[in-house]
Image (cartoon, rainbow, N blue to C red):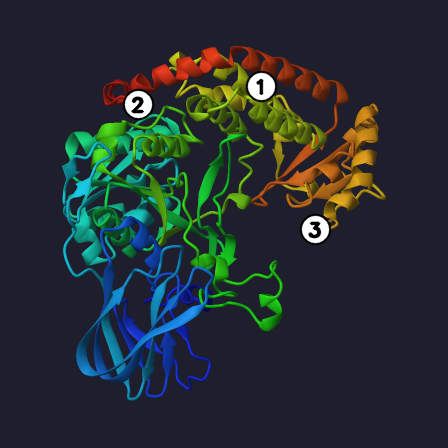
C-alpha cells in the first residue's frame, strides 16, 4: 500500500478506488487494506499488478500464485491483459474469512501482458499479506558456458555512492531500514563518499546507522565520478562480502523499499543470470514513468528508446488499465496505456537502480574508468556480449530527477558524453567506420553553433582530443578531467550563470523571431522558412551592439535552434530555473570551433581502425579488480 500521506497521484501507482465507492478505503500499514462494505478496489496498478510477460520470458516459472488473507466476505476477480492492453477475465473467487491461493498460468504472455486482481467487498473486508508467489524455491541457473550455478539466497549488498548530497544520502539510508523484511535481505550497505559534505555530519546520521545495525560501511575517496563510486561498490562487494547480488542505487532518489526485494527475486528466479534494471519514476512528478526501456542505436551509437518503449507516461492521467475512449482508440497518436502492456527488450539500464548477480561481476570485471556517462551503458553491452542481458523490469523502480530538468547535454558533462560515447562505440561498433557517428555529432555541433553554445563546442573538442589519446590515460585523468574542463568553460560567456535576467539590462526585443514550440504533422514544413532565415543570419557578421543587453529572455524550453539562430544575444534559463546564461553570438569564434571540430573528426576517421584495436585490447586492464584496487589504495 502507499505510505501514509501520499497524494492522490502517487496512490494511483498502488491502487485505484471505484468511482461509485461511498466511503474511502484505509490502510493502517503497508500490508493491510480495509475496504468498506459495498466498495470496490482495483490493483491494476504499476506497483501491484504482476508483469507476467517478463516473468514468462526471463524466469523459471510457468505459473504464479496470487496469495492473500481475507477477513470478511469479498469477491476476488482476477484479470490478465494481452500485449495490446485488451483485458480478459481469468477467474472470480468468493472468499470469506480465509486464506486464498489462486494459481495462474503464465503461458499466455509471450509478447506482453499483466495479471492483476480487483476486490468487491460484500461486507466490511480487510485484505492482508497479498503477494504474487512462486510454488517452489528458485533452482540452479545456467551460465553461457553451460555451467550450473546457484540457487542463491535472498541476500543483496546495496551500494550508494554519494557526492555532496549528505541530506539525500541519509534519507536513502533510512529508507533502506524502513521495511524489516527488506532490511533482512540486505547484507551490507556500501557508500563511497566522494565529496566534501559528508553524510556523517547530518544530525540524524547516527540514527540511520543504528537502524542499519552494523551493515553500513563508508569509503571516503576523491571525486572519481559515478564510475569511480560504482566501481568501488563492486570492488568492495567482491572483496569483502559474500552477497550473491550487488545493487547499485543513486543517492539523489526516493526509494520504494519493496523494489529491492523484487529485483532480488527476479534475479534469483531467472533461468540464467541477468542484470535487473529498475525503472525511473519522476521525482518531481511522481506518478510519471520516465521510460520503459532503452537501447543503443548501433549505427550512430546514441541512446534512444528501445523498440515498443514508452516515455513520460503519467499514471495519474492514464492508469495501467486505461485503453482510451472510442475516439482515442481510433487515433494512434492518443495517449493511452496500451503500449505499457507490450514487453520491452533493452540494451542497458541506468545505474539509478541496477542489480548485478555476483557471478556477472566476477566474470565481466568492474566498470570502465569513464567518470560519468556511458559507464552503465558500456557495462550492460559488455555483459550482454558475455551472455548476461539486462532486463528493465516493470514494478521495480525508484524516484529520480528526470533528465529534462538537467543541462547535462550542454554543460561540463558534454565532455564526458562525447568522449565516452566514442570510447564505447570503439568497443562495440561493428561496421565500416565511424561515419554515421561523426555525422550525427557534427549535426549536434551545428545546433550548438546556432544556439551560441560555444563552451559546449570547446569541451567537445577536448573530448575528441582525449579520445584520440587512446585508452592508456583513462585511469590517470579520472580525477583531473573535471577540473580541467571546468577551467576551459570559464572562458565562455554561455557557461557563466547569472542569478537572474533581472540583473541584466532589459531585453531589447527581436520582432518576428519565433519562440513557441512547433509540433504536429506540419512542423518540419513550417520550419523551412525559419531555417532559411536562420542560415542567412548565421552567415552575417554579428551585431555587437546586442552584447550589452539581451534581445530576448528565453526559458530553457524556448531555447531552440530556430529561435537562437536568428539572434545575436539572449539569456537562457538553466533547466532547473536557478539562473540564466547570457549568450552572445560570435561568428569568428563559432567558425573556428567548427573548423577545429571537423579537423579532429578527420583524425578520428583516419585512425579509427587503430583506435578500436587499442581500446578493445585495453578493456581487461581498465576493468580489472587489481588496477581499480590500486586507484582506491591511492585514495586512502
Q: Residue at x 54, y 29 (%)?
A: 414
Is 619 placed left or right of 568 in the picture? left
Q: CA distance from mark 2 to mark 1?
A: 26 Å
According to the picture, the residue beneath numbered tag 2 turns out to be 623
Mark sitting earlier along the chain (2/1): 1
Location of mark 3 (residue)? 519
Give the residue displayed 74% in from the left and 27% down from the top: 585
Question: Eyeballing the image, is 374 above or below 406?
Answer: above
Q: Residues within 10 Å of mark 3 (few under 14, many from 20)?
A: few
What residue sits right under mark 1 in the picture? 461
Mark sitting earlier along the chain (2/3): 3
Say if mark 2 contacts mark 3, CB within 8 Å: no
Above or below, 519 relative to 632: below
Q: Residues within 10 Å of mark 2 (few under 14, many from 20)?
A: some
Location of residue 181 in the rendering, given as x and y in whole percent from the top left corner:
19, 57
Instruction: Tell me the distance, in whole angstroms, between the alpha carbons under discs 2 and 3.
Output: 45 Å
Q: CA distance from mark 3 to mark 1?
A: 33 Å
Amino acid at each position: 500500500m502507499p505510505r501514509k500521506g501520499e497524494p492522490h497521484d502517487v496512490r494511483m501507482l498502488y491502487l485505484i478506488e471505484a468511482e461509485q465507492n461511498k466511503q474511502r478505503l484505509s490502510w493502517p500499514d503497508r500490508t493491510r487494506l480495509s475496504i468498506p462494505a459495498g466498495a470496490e478496489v482495483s490493483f491494476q496498478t504499476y506497483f501491484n499488478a504482476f508483469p507476467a510477460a517478463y516473468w514468462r520470458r526471463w524466469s523459471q516459472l510457468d505459473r504464479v500464485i496470487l496469495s492473500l488473507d481475507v477477513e470478511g466476505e469479498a469477491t476476488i476477480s482476477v484479470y490478465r491483459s494481452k500485449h495490446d492492453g485488451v483485458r480478459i477475465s481469468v477467474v472470480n473467487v468468493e472468499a470469506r474469512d480465509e486464506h486464498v491461493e489462486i494459481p495462474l498460468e503464465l503461458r499466455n504472455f509471450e509478447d506482453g501482458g499483466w495479471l492483476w486482481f480487483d476486490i468487491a467487498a460484500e461486507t466490511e473486508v480487510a485484505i492482508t499479506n497479498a503477494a504474487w508467489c512462486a510454488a517452489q524455491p528458485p533452482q540452479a541457473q545456467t551460465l553461457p558456458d553451460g555451467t550450473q550455478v546457484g540457487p542463491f539466497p535472498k541476500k543483496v549488498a546495496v551500494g550508494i555512492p554519494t557526492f555532496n548530497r549528505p541530506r539525500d544520502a541519509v534519507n536513502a539510508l533510512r529508507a533502506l531500514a524502513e521495511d524489516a523484511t527488506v532490511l533482512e535481505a540486505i547484507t551490507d550497505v556500501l557508500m563511497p563518499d566522494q565529496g566534501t559534505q559528508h553524510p556523517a555530519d547530518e544530525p540524524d546520521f547516527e540514527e540511520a546507522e543504528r537502524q542499519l545495525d552494523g551493515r553500513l560501511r563508508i569509503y571516503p575517496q576523491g571525486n572519481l565520478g559515478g564510475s569511480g563510486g560504482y566501481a568501488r561498490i563492486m570492488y568492495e562487494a567482491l572483496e569483502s562480502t559474500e552477497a550473491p547480488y550487488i545493487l547499485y542505487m543513486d543517492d539523489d532518489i526516493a526509494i520504494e523499499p519493496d523494489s529491492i526485494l523484487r529485483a532480488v527475486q527476479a534475479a534469483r528466479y531467472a533461468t540464467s543470470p541477468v542484470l535487473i534494471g529498475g525503472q525511473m519514476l519522476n521525482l518531481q512528478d511522481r506518478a510519471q514513468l520516465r521510460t520503459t526501456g532503452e537501447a543503443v542505436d548501433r549505427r550512430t551509437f546514441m541512446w534512444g528508446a528501445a523498440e515498443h518503449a514508452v516515455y513520460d507516461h503519467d499514471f495519474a492521467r492514464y492508469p495501467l488499465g486505461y485503453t482510451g475512449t472510442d475516439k482515442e482508440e481510433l487515433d494512434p497518436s492518443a495517449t493511452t496505456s496500451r503500449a505499457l502492456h507490450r514487453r520491452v527488450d533493452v540494451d542497458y539500464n541506468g545505474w539509478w537502480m541496477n542489480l548485478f548477480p555476483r557471478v556477472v561481476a566476477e566474470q565481466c570485471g568492474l566498470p570502465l574508468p569513464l567518470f560519468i556517462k556511458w559507464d552503465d551503458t558500456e557495462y550492460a553491452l559488455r555483459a550482454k556480449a558475455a551472455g548476461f542481458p539486462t532486463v528493465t523490469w516493470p514494478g521495480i523502480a525508484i524516484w529520480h530527477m528526470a533528465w529534462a530538468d538537467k543541462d547535462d547535454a550542454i554543460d561540463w558533462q558534454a565532455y564526458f558524453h562525447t568522449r565516452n560515447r566514442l570510447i564505447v562505440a570503439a568497443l562495440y561498433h561493428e561496421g565500416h567506420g565511424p561515419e554515421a557517428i561523426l555525422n550525427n555529432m557534427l549535426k549536434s555541433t551545428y545546433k550548438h553553433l546556432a544556439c551560441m553554445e560555444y563552451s559546449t563546442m570547446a569541451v567537445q573538442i577536448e573530448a575528441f582530443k582525449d579520445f584520440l589519446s587512446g585508452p592508456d590515460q583513462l585511469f590517470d585523468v579520472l580525477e583531473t578531467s573535471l577540473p580541467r574542463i571546468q577551467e576551459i568553460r570559464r572562458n565562455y560567456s554561455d557557461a557563466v550563470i547569472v542569478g537572474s535576467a533581472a540583473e541584466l539590462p532589459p531585453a531589447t526585443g527581436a520582432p518576428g523571431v519565433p519562440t513557441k514550440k512547433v509540433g504536429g504533422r506540419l512542423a518540419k514544413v513550417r520550419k523551412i522558412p525559419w531555417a532559411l532565415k536562420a542560415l542567412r543570419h548565421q552567415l552575417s557578421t554579428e551585431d555587437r551592439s546586442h552584447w550589452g543587453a539581451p534581445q530576448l529572455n528565453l526559458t530553457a524550453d524556448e531555447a531552440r535552434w530556430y529561435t537562437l539562430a536568428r539572434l545575436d544575444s539572449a539569456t537562457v534559463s538553466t533547466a532547473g530555473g536557478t539562473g540564466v546564461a547570457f549568450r552572445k553570438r560570435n561568428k569568428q569564434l563559432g567558425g573556428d570551433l567548427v573548423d577545429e571540430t571537423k579537423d579532429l573528426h578527420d583524425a578520428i576517421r583516419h585512425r579509427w581502425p587503430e583506435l578500436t584495436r587499442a581500446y578493445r585490447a585495453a578493456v581487461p586492464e581498465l576493468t580489472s579488480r587489481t588496477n581499480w584496487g590500486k586507484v582506491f589504495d591511492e585514495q586512502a
